[in-house]
């Protein structure tokens, strides 16, 4: 009878299902009792496999059947239940989906004579691909992927396999068959060993889920249940730990850096030993010796150094620099790396523990512990063993201190015993120990583990305990290497407890050595403080350096410097330490005891503990008292008690600080009180008072303070900053050297407040004509850019008058300034008239009559004979002229304007109107209305509306005089005085009001080369023949004294320009038509127009002179 078994789909593996003959048997795995038999098959059941969602489910009434090309001997589902692998008697493997459709067919060489007898998918979910293990009766073990591709080569078995199965996680493979045993293989097919030998063929074997139990069924009906125990195979040397992984690999782990390196093998690893740069690995038939590539302590790359191809049986394996040591019960053998036995030692009892304790290469020492309690030291180059000591109990673990003076032993009674090697004396013993290790960096520290606790012992102090699972195998600094189950870990253990034990006994140097192994920052600070109080400055300095406390390091440095200079008062040093630690009262007592009361006074003063400080005042010393008051004032200031601080500062004579506090808090009364009490020689505090008065907007007090100090410059600056100009002028009158400091800022202030006339006067007064001109020029430019043409005209007129003033005062610049005067006068008039044009073109409604706009447009067009000033638009001018000319019947002029516009870039808003006007003007007669033609009042010539000469008569070249409002030609003729007649004399002659003559006498005379000068000697202006004569050059009208005397004052208008200009005289030819002239800008107006404009604006429309101002 042959049995097949499988684990039922339960995660705990509590039931076992076995196929025996045509029945299924269900057993309990805990005690082997039969739970129930299952019937239903009529023939022999060869195999059992279960899938959650496979070919059959309870919902289906019938089972789907699929034909196969040969008898199926075995089957296995993939992890996800999507595919089923079938093993055939004909050696073919069929992989089908859960619907039964064949997806992959694997045909192998020699398959006909090699039936597939067992297959199994690897259950591991960590594998990238599904792996199928196949065992056939060709005595081969093969591995395939789901795609049918073979993994690696076939492995020969030398027996007929009947069953193959994986462990739950897929790390191992079980194989049984005709060799009457079950063998353990790695997942890659490397044989590891035999699990159990039977008396008949093994037909089936399975591993219990998630455990190390294996069950097997044999030909004779025997069912066997085995437990596998995987022992830990490892080795440790300092911070390098080597251990076995997957039974065939070795992993070397650096416990400090956590680096790992894997050394792959193809055979079972039986023993591992590691020492310095050597690594020995024992396999069933050989020993491999590895070495590091370099001497770097962090190097983790090993290479094969030697290979000893020989089978060895041993309990323990140790490697040295040039040898390997084999332990066989009582015997130790020393072999070279070539496999030659060099030395052998035979012990009295079984060897329980062996460890390499270092030494020169080829001469290392071994520490050996025996079952009879004997402990020996053996050198590999010496045949004689040295007995260190003998105890009554068996040795379980050994370790020797770093200096080899002490020996720690753990016996079979779990007791840790520490001996002095030289005297053989038992120093101390501790219970509950299963392993022990000395600290490799500290002679007096060891640790041992047991009972779930880690025990650390330093010197003769009590043991310090903390919880820890596992075995201690190493102790390096603050790191303890612990082996727990199969993992090695480095545990960081603060050495605080042993350090405090040393501190309690004032053993500062020993405590520092312990702290260096690893303690917290708080422990370092405690050590530093204790050492400092114990005046152990060297230890304290090192400890404070570790925590980077510069404050205490400076204290120690200063104490050491004082000691170098011969100071040796420990009480004073300790007092400084107490002061730094905040123990002020203790420090004060020590200061007083050592005769340094002043230091205690300073300390309490700095701490604002003034009540205590008074106890240390030396009687009658005003200096100390003043210093104490000053510090108390500082403290009052810092705690936000400013009034008290001010009073204390004043008591201590610290006026500056009192002033600063009062000023910062705005206490004006306190400041003036201080200022009046101060002597005028104390300039700095008085200046500070004045500064705060200015800041607090109390210029009167500031002025009083500056007067007390006598700082006139600061006083002037104060008046200027506060715009107290009257006071500033009063100071500058008494002290002319401050004239510039007063008038220049005053002028700038006036200009900023749009008081330009006053600003100009101020600039003049300060002698800053250039600045006055520059300011006005900038204002003018801004007005033009912003299209404020009325303002621009006003500013240009101001500029012209400014230039005239400069020309009057400075003869060197007279010519230049006069040129600028005439230029700016012309620009002022141009911008004045363009203002109306711009308003007409931009605004929807016009406030001017068509005749006025027509005259303005003509005047502006005739004025723009040369270059066009900035901001003036010829398009706007011509557009207004064309519109008004057409409206008033000046069709010829309108046609000319439209033609000119065609050659210019016209804005889009005018384009349609211009095009329409250009067309409609063609329907009008080509002449101008005679009513619009201007008349020359000198020669009575009718002038064309479009005059190429500009605003002068085409016949006599006499310049027209225009009204500054309607820009009609006024009935005025300009005349000039005969040489030798002054302006004052001319005015006096005109004012005589002599009787008029009925007859006129005209006398002419030639003067100059070609120029003809006319002298008018008539009493009144008639129209004599010579005034009607034309000519190519302008001939001015010159009058003598008799003519002047015959004129009436109401008929003559005089422009009384200041010097160096001459006055201009105009004679009205229509005395009944009243004309008014502005006495400031000398612009002419019809009297009615002027009065209306003055009523509207309360000033002259050109120069903005207010009507209530006197003529200056």
Image (cartoon, rainbow, N blue to C red):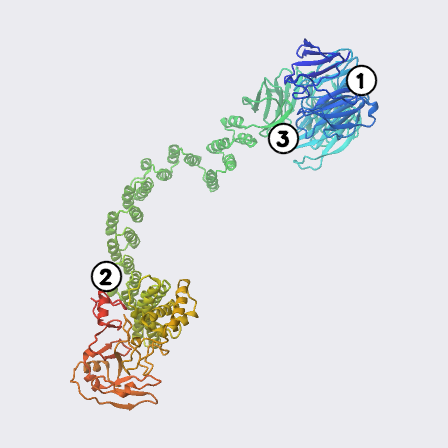
Placement of 715 over or under 1033, stated as above or below = above
* Residue sticking out furthest to the front: 923
Q: In the image, is 985 to the left or to the right of 273?
A: left
Q: Quadrant of residue 606?
A: top left
- Give the alpha-carbon distance from disc 1 to disc 3, as whole Å: 44 Å
Question: Residue 173, image x and y in percent?
Answer: 72, 22
Q: Residues within 10 Å of mark 1 (few under 14, many from 20)?
A: some
Q: Residues within 10 Å of mark 2 (few under 14, many from 20)?
A: few
Image depth: mark 1 or mark 3 in front: 1
Q: Nearer the viewer, residue 875 or 295?
A: 875
- Give the alpha-carbon distance from disc 1 to disc 2, as whole Å: 130 Å
Question: Residue 137, image x and y in percent?
Answer: 81, 21
Mark sitting earlier along the chain (3/2): 3
Q: In the image, is 724 to the left or to the right of 471?
A: left
Q: Nearer the viewer, residue 573 or 833?
A: 833
In the rendering, which numbered label is found on residue 255?
3
Which secondary structure lies at badge 3? loop
Residue at 76% over, 28% down: 105
Question: Residue 796, image x and y in percent?
Answer: 32, 69
Question: Residue 808, image x and y in percent?
Answer: 29, 75
- Give the alpha-carbon distance from disc 3 to disc 2, as whole Å: 91 Å
Which secondary structure lies at badge 2? helix
Q: Nearer the viewer, residue 225 or 69?
A: 69
Q: Quadrant of the C terminus?
A: bottom left
Does the rendering let one see residue 785? yes
- The residue carrying mark 1 is 179
Q: Quadrant of residue 792?
A: bottom left
Image depth: mark 1 or mark 2 in front: 1
* Residue sticking out furthest to the left: 995
- The residue carrying mark 2 is 726
Does the rendering let one see residue 268? no
Q: Quadrant of residue 944?
A: bottom left
């Amino acid at each position: 009878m042959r049995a097949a078994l499988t684990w039922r789909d339960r995660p705990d593996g509590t039931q076992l299902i076995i196929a025996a003959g045509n029945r299924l048997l269900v057993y309990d795995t805990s005690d082997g009792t039969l739970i129930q038999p299952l019937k239903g098959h009529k023939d022999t059941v060869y195999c059992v496999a279960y899938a959650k969602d496979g070919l059959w489910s309870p919902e289906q009434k019938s089972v789907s059947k699929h034909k196969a090309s040969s008898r199926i001997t075995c089957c296995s589902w993939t992890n996800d239940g999507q595919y089923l692998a079938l093993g055939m008697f004909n050696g073919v493997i069929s992989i089908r989906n859960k619907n039964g459709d064949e997806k992959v067919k694997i045909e192998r060489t020699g398959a006909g004579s090699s039936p597939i007898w067992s297959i199994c998918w690897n259950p591991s979910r960590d594998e990238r691909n599904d792996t199928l293990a196949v065992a056939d009766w060709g005595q081969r073990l093969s591995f395939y992927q789901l795609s049918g591709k073979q993994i690696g080569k076939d492995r020969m078995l030398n027996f007929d396999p009947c069953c193959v199965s994986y462990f739950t996680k897929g790390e191992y493979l079980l194989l049984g068959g005709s060799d009457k045993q079950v063998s353990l293989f790695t997942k890659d097919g490397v044989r590891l060993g035999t699990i159990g030998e039977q008396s008949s063929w093994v037909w089936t074997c399975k591993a219990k889920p998630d455990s190390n139990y294996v069950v097997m069924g044999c030909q004779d009906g025997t069912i066997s249940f085995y437990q596998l125990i995987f022992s830990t195979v490892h080795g440790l040397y300092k911070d390098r730990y080597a251990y076995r992984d997957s039974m065939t690999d070795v992993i070397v782990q650096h416990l400090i850096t956590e680096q790992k390196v894997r050394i792959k093998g193809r055979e079972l690893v039986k023993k591992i030993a590691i020492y310095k740069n050597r690594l020995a690995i024992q396999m069933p038939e050989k020993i491999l010796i590895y070495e590091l590539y370099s001497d770097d302590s962090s190097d983790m790359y090993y290479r094969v150094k030697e290979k000893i191809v020989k089978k060895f049986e041993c309990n323990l394996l140790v490697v040295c620099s040039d040898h390997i040591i084999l332990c066989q019960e009582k015997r130790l053998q020393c072999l070279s790396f070539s496999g030659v036995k060099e030395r052998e030692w035979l012990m009295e009892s079984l060897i329980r523990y062996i460890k390499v304790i270092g030494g020169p290469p080829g001469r290392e020492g071994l520490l050996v512990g025996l079952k009879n309690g004997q402990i020996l030291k053996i050198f590999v180059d010496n045949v004689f063993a040295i007995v260190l000591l003998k105890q009554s109990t068996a040795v379980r673990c050994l370790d020797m201190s770093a200096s080899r003076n002490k020996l720690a032993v753990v016996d079979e009674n779990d007791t840790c015993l520490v001996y002095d090697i030289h005297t053989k004396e038992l120093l101390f013993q501790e219970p509950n120990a299963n392993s022990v290790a000395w600290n490799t960096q500290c002679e007096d520290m060891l640790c041992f583990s047991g009972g779930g606790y880690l025990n650390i012992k330093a010197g003769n102090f009590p043991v310090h305990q903390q919880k820890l699972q596992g075995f201690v195998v190493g102790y390096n600094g603050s790191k303890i290497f612990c082996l727990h189950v199969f993992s090695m870990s480095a545990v960081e253990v603060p050495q605080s407890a042993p350090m405090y034990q040393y501190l309690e006994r004032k053993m500062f140097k020993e405590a520092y050595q312990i702290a260096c192994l690893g303690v917290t920052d708080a422990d370092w600070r405690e050590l530093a403080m204790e050492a400092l109080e114990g005046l152990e400055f060297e230890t304290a300095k090192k400890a404070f350096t570790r925590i980077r406390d510069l404050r205490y390091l400076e204290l120690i440095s200063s104490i050491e410097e004082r000691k170098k200079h011969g100071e040796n008062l420990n009480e004073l040093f300790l007092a400084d330490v107490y002061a730094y630690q905040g123990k002020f009262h203790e420090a004060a007592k020590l200061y007083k005891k050592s005769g340094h009361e002043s230091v205690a006074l300073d300390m309490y003063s700095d701490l604002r503990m003034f009540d205590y400080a008074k106890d240390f005042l030396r009687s009658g010393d005003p200096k100390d008292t003043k210093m104490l008051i000053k510090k108390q004032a500082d403290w009052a200031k810092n705690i936000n008690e400013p009034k008290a601080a001010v009073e204390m500062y004043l008591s201590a004579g610290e006026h500056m600080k009192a002033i600063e506090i009062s000023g910062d808090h705005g206490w004006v009364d306190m400041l003036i009180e201080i200022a009046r009490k101060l002597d005028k020689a104390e300039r700095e505090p008085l200046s500070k008072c004045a500064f705060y008065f200015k800041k607090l907007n109390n210029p009167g007090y500031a002025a009083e303070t500056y007067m007390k100090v006598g700082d006139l410059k600061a006083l002037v600056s104060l008046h200027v900053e506060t715009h107290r100009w009257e006071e500033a002028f009063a100071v500058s009158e008494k002290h002319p050297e401050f004239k510039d400091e007063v008038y220049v800022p005053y002028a700038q202030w006036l200009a900023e407040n749009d008081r330009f006339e006053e600003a100009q006067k101020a600039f003049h007064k300060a002698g800053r004509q250039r600045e006055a001109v520059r300011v006005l020029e900038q204002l003018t430019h801004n007005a033009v850019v912003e299209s404020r043409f009325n303002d621009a005209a006003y500013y240009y007129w101001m500029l012209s008058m400014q230039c005239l003033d400069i020309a009057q005062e400075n003869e060197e610049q007279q010519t230049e300034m006069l040129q600028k005067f005439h230029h700016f006068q012309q620009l002022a008039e141009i911008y004045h008239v363009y203002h109306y044009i711009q308003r007409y073109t931009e605004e929807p409604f016009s406030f001017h009559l068509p005749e006025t706009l027509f005259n303005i447009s003509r005047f502006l067009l005739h004025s723009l004979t040369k270059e066009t000033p900035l901001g003036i638009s010829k398009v706007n001018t011509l557009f207004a002229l064309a519109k008004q000319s057409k409206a008033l019947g000046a069709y010829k002029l309108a046609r000319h304007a439209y033609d000119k516009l065609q050659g210019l870039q016209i804005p889009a808003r005018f384009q349609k109107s211009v095009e329409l006007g250009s067309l409609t003007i063609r329907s009008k007669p080509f002449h101008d209305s005679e009513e619009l033609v201007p008349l020359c009042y000198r020669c009575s010539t009718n002038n064309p509306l479009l005059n190429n000469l500009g605003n002068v008569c085409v016949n006599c070249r006499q310049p027209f005089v225009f009204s500054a409002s309607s820009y009609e030609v006024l009935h005025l003729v300009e005349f000039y005085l005969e040489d030798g007649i002054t302006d004052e004399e001319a005015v006096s002659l005109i004012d005589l009001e002599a009787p008029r003559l009925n007859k006129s006498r005209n006398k002419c005379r030639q003067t100059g080369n070609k120029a003809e000068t006319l002298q008018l000697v008539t009493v009144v202006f008639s129209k004599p023949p010579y005034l009607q004569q034309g000519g190519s050059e302008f001939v001015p009208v010159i009058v003598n004294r008799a003519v002047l005397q015959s004129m009436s004052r109401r008929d003559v208008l005089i422009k009384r320009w200041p010097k160096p200009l001459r006055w201009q005289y105009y004679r009205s030819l229509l005395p009944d038509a009243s004309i008014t002239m502005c006495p400031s800008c000398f612009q002419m107006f019809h009297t009615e127009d002027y009065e209306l404009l003055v009523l509207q604006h309360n000033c002259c429309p050109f120069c903005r002179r207010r009507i209530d101002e006197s003529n200056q």
